[in-house]
Image (cartoon, rainbow, N blue to C red):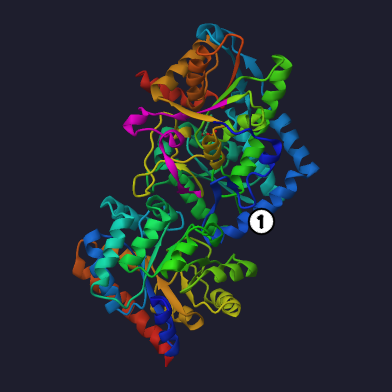
Amino acid sequence: MSRIQTVLQTLKGQGRKALIPYITAGDPHPDRTVELMHTLVEAGADIIELGVPFSDPMADGPVIQLACERALKHGTSLRQVLEMVKTFRSRDDKTPIVLMGYLNPVEAMGYEVFSDAAKAAGVDGVLTVDLPPEEAEDVAPLFAERGLDPIFLLAPTTTEDRIRAISAHSSGYIYYVSLKGVTGSAQLNVDDVAEKVSRIHALTSVPVGVGFGIRNAETAAAVGRVSDGVIVGSILVDTIAKNQDDIEALKSSLVSLLKPMREALDELAS
Amino acid sequence: MSVKLTEEMLRALPDTRGHFGAYGGRFVSETLMDSLMQLETEYLKLRDDAEFQATFDKDLADYVGRPSPLYFAERLTRETGGAQIWLKREDLNHTGAHKVNNTIGQALLASFLGKKRVIAETGAGQHGVATATVCARLGLECHVFMGSEDVKRQSLNVYRMKLLGAEVHAVESGTKTLKDAMNEAMRDWVTNVDDTFYIIGTVAGPHPYPMLVRDFQAVIGRETRRQALAQAGRLPDALVACVGGGSNAIGLFYPFLTDESVAMYGVEAGGLGLSTGQHAAPLSAGRPGVLHGNRTYLMEDENGQIAGTHSVSAGLDYPGVGPEHSWLKDIGRAQYVSVTDDEALAGFRQLTRVEGIMPALESAHAVAYATKLAASMDKGQMVVINVSGRGDKDIHTIAQLDGIEV
Ligand SMILES: Cc1ncc(COP(=O)(O)O)c(C=O)c1O
């Protein structure tokens, strides 16, 4: 069983929901990413989604676009991101890491080279926003051979046939995009999410994480009630931007955003 | 060496997932997949629908003013001293460029699909103007995304779009040019996917766009073929077109692909010269990657980040290219070359001076290469240049280079 599967199964046994924070690697500076990852874990993260910066983040709103620009200004490359994961692993070999990004940096590195390097660094899952399963035929077997979980997206517009097909290609978890829009949008509708996720649950046994539009403990709890985990991104990246010059303030702002979410999620279990 | 293409091979391309060999495809976030598949299904139906095609043909005739002439450039030929040079006059179309062939087709698709809101990206503003124009005519709400750098460079076209009732959104992210405008259009589309039709301006983007834009632009090549046979009694020996995303070039090339005797040259923006890195020539100097929904040749750094581009012509200032061109390059059916900013400007001046035709700076790249090519060919041979647009929009740029305030 992969690290992701182990964590999600343990949580499930406890009746608990996964808290999955996202930050962009290299933001505000490549030297800070590893310590911020540890901070996320201390604040209650079960899994970390680590963004690989890209020059053209088409599915992201302004907050994560700017995070990519900050990271790229410091030259953060996919190879460096893998180094960060390796360093993180020297102190934490339990928390699963999912790389989240766009396909071109992976293509540039080469599918096989990337798969080997990701595995060696201690990466557990790979979510490539602009890679639907139809186009993943070449890379999927390379991930499978190395035990890397391929994480795919489902959206409000995904038909039942596609939910079935995409689930069949997924392991670890499936990422349900809660709304039509880019990251950082705010108009998440909890009832719509509940309905769609229960349909997804009826069609697959792969756990479902829900992201986009989760900004506070209240929505985290509402979404956690109907899913297996919540993914929190833009609100964290926004606080990184605001506190980029003061690392201690930055870390405590991350903790004060995540702690209430952790508590609200854990209250669901009791 | 070149592969002999047959009608049957061409009919099989793109394949059902939108691939041209190793290129093309559908690399988008999941939210858009359903819309793209619907668009593909509906388009394939309408492509064989007599009423749809009749409406398209009638609009091209009565509204755009087609067929555009094929004109023998006698003085340019004499001054060049080689093969006969003929011009396909897309500059005479309504709105001044080939772009309108495609926007007529896609706006018609939007109407058939019942979508009332249209979005588009634009670089030079020609595609934005052509989109705003057809939206005005059909009463559709129109939003155009344009990099803030281009908004500054092409203020005249921004004003034209506003007069036509479109809302122009200046894009501040990334390099603030065409690629960023396309990112922003994709973001709008993902947000408003239910009621919005995205009119992409070139043969790039996710499947089915490269196919349907090609089909709408192929009228250029079909007319050229017919006109060459009627007016010159023969097929051309060579076709020359500029390549930004590649829509005017594929439009000219496509109906000739099975004519083995016809050579094809796509001319990319060499900017300050390929060796400087300051250019927009992915086929000449890039490598395959994935951007904006398709796999194709791209300009990128060693880490897969998309590189900044430079061209004197905003319409060619794009780091990617349509996937069908990448395929044509690899199989050797078309040659891709580049000319520099300075060569293109000289081409602009030459055509203006000896033929009284001011080409767009994009098209001037084709002129510059074609005169070099024609000079190396025999007098009995025939070259066709696609004059994809007229130069009115570029007078400011040219005047500025001459140090003149207009
Ligand atoms: C006149 C003209 N020609 C060519 C182009 C480049 O586009 P494409 O390569 O798709 O024909 C443009 C784009 O704005 C244009 O305005």
Nearer to me, A105 or B192: A105
Tell me where the magenta segment starts and ends, as one range.
Answer: B264-293
In this picture, is B296 found above or below B29?
A: above
* Residue A41 pos. (x, y %): 29, 76
Task: Name the side, left or right, on which B146 lies relative to B134.
Answer: left
The residue drawn where x is 45% and y is 38% is B318
In this picture, is A63 found above or below B176?
A: below
Q: Chain of mark 1?
A: B
- Residue B269 on the magenta segment: yes
Instruction: Name the residue that disc number 1 marks.
Output: B38
Task: Name the side, left or right, on which B63 lies relative to A1.
Answer: right
Q: Amino acid at mark 1?
A: Gln
Nearer to me, B237 or A174: B237
- The image quadrant of residue A40 is bottom left
Nearer to me, A122 or A203: A122
* Residue B173 pos. (x, y %): 38, 48
- Residue A170 on the magenta segment: no
* Residue B261 pos. (x, y %): 63, 23
* Residue A79 pos. (x, y %): 31, 56
Secondary structure found at label 1 = helix
- The reply to whether residue B61 is in sight is yes
The residue drawn where x is 62% and y is 48% is B208
Q: Quadrant of the N terminus of chain B?
A: top right
Crowding at mark 1 (Cα within 10 Å: few <14, some 14-19, many 20+): few
Task: Name the side, left or right, on which B155 lies relative to A241.
Answer: right
